[in-house]
Amino acid sequence: MQSGRKVYLDYARVLAIISISCNHAINRSFPGFESSYNAFLAFPRWVTVFRAVVFVFSRVGVPVFLMISGALLLNKRIETKEDILRFYKHNLGGLVITSEIWIFLNFLVHAYFNKMIAARGILYTLARCLGCMLFIDQTQPDLVVYGSIWYIPMIICVYLLIPFVNILLHKYATRLMLIPAALVAVSAMILPGIRSILAAAGYDISIEFRLSAGKLFSFYLLFVIVGFYVANDALKKLSKTLVTFLALFTLAILCAYQYWEYTTPTGWAIEYESFLLLLHSGFLFESLRRFIPASAQNRGVTYIAKISFAIYFVHIFIMSGLVIFLPRFGMGGLHPAARFCLLEAVSFLGSIPLIAVFSKIPLFKKYVFLIKD
């Protein structure tokens, strides 16, 4: 084991990347339905239960990844301008380079399948490519580059703020950070959650909170901050039994709520703004921290954890290819559950050997996959 390595974070990374790949697979497993409500009417109840449970699990990955960032990056020593610049160089610089490479590759794929050069010309195509590289999302139907990689602009913005949140937490008052965090939770999570419940129940009621999250900071930072607090024993007074119960209880509520949404005409999916998802992710993260000892280190888990960011990009390409070619092999009508299992297994497991082979090239390892020793 590397000196100081926190083994539970490796398991958390593996769980998170499996969760995220499941999200992409489950969202591609119900093609041909205009809404989740139509899918509910078309399939047996167990399919909707399956979909709800998998979808809720698939929503945990991003919060857990952000909590890992909080556990690691908010515990770094950042006090001076030089510390901030060093953080940007070592943590943000590589992230931006790798992201730009994959944004470019995504653009090439979309441009090729939409015959963009033939239809609109080389100058138009280059202008659209430049826009994507500059994080300018262009919403025309012939270009959907940021669909499955929406996470990248978000995490770059979060990383830009992490040094300053770090300084506030350590240099001034740790608990005072809870005041703006609470306002963001009310504005971006709690009230929108109440609105969605009322809408699904048939009540069109407008609820506005003027101390909006947009005037403070991204609600995604809440996951980072919760990760910091959990990693620093904020929940140490809770017993293991209670932490486990709370993790399972919040999971059960989320699954039940998602199932209910699928049975209504609104059919909304649980978003990352869900306050209950924040609670569940926090208790899950604490459970991993409590139950996974240093002695549980496993070479396979450690390796997948190290390449998790690379898996995030590579599995999208494999899964997108499967979606295109399955109908050509007479498998377009697969049952949604079977389709999900196929997309998930092939894209996730297929990513690992590809990364293992190409990461032997130093430039690929460092810049394309962002694998750190």
Image: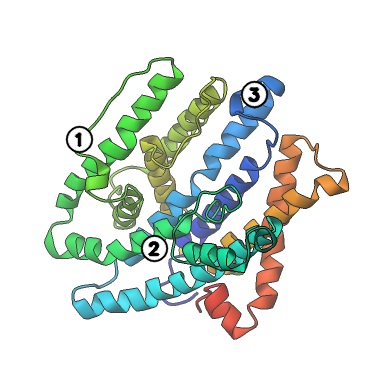
Is disc 1 placed on a helix, strand or loop? loop
Q: Is residue 71 visible?
A: no
Of pointers 2 and 3, the one earlier in the residue sequence? 3
Instruction: Give the labeled residue for mark 2.
Output: 156
x then y, percent, for residue 222: 31, 49
Of pointers 1 and 3, the one earlier in the residue sequence? 3
Give the residue drawn at x 19%, y 38%.
Answer: 211
What's the distance in space between the residues labelled 1 and 3, CA to CA? 36 Å
How is the protein colored in the picture?
rainbow
From this view, report whether residue 270 is shown above or below residue 356: above
Which of the 4 image quadrants contains residue 304?
bottom right
- Residue sitting farthest toward the left: 172
224 or 205: nearer the viewer = 205
Give the residue type at disc 2: Ile
Give the residue drawn at x 46%, y 61%.
Answer: 9
x then y, percent, for residue 77: 25, 73
Give the residue type at disc 1: Arg
Residue 353 marker: none
Is disc 2 placed on a helix, strand or loop? helix
What's the distance in space between the residues labelled 2 and 3, CA to CA? 37 Å
Left or right: 269 as drawn, with respect to 119: left
Left or right: 83 as drawn, with respect to 55: left
Which of the 4 image quadrants contains residue 204?
top left
Left or right: 345 as drawn, with respect to 309: right
Give the residue drawn at x 67%, y 77%.
Answer: 358
Is disc 3 placed on a helix, strand or loop? helix
From this view, report whether residue 325 is shown above or below residue 266: below
What's the distance in space between the residues labelled 2 and 1, CA to CA? 27 Å
Instruction: Give the labeled residue for mark 1.
Output: 210
Residue 38 marker: 3
114 or 225: nearer the viewer = 114
Of pointers 2 and 1, the one earlier in the residue sequence? 2
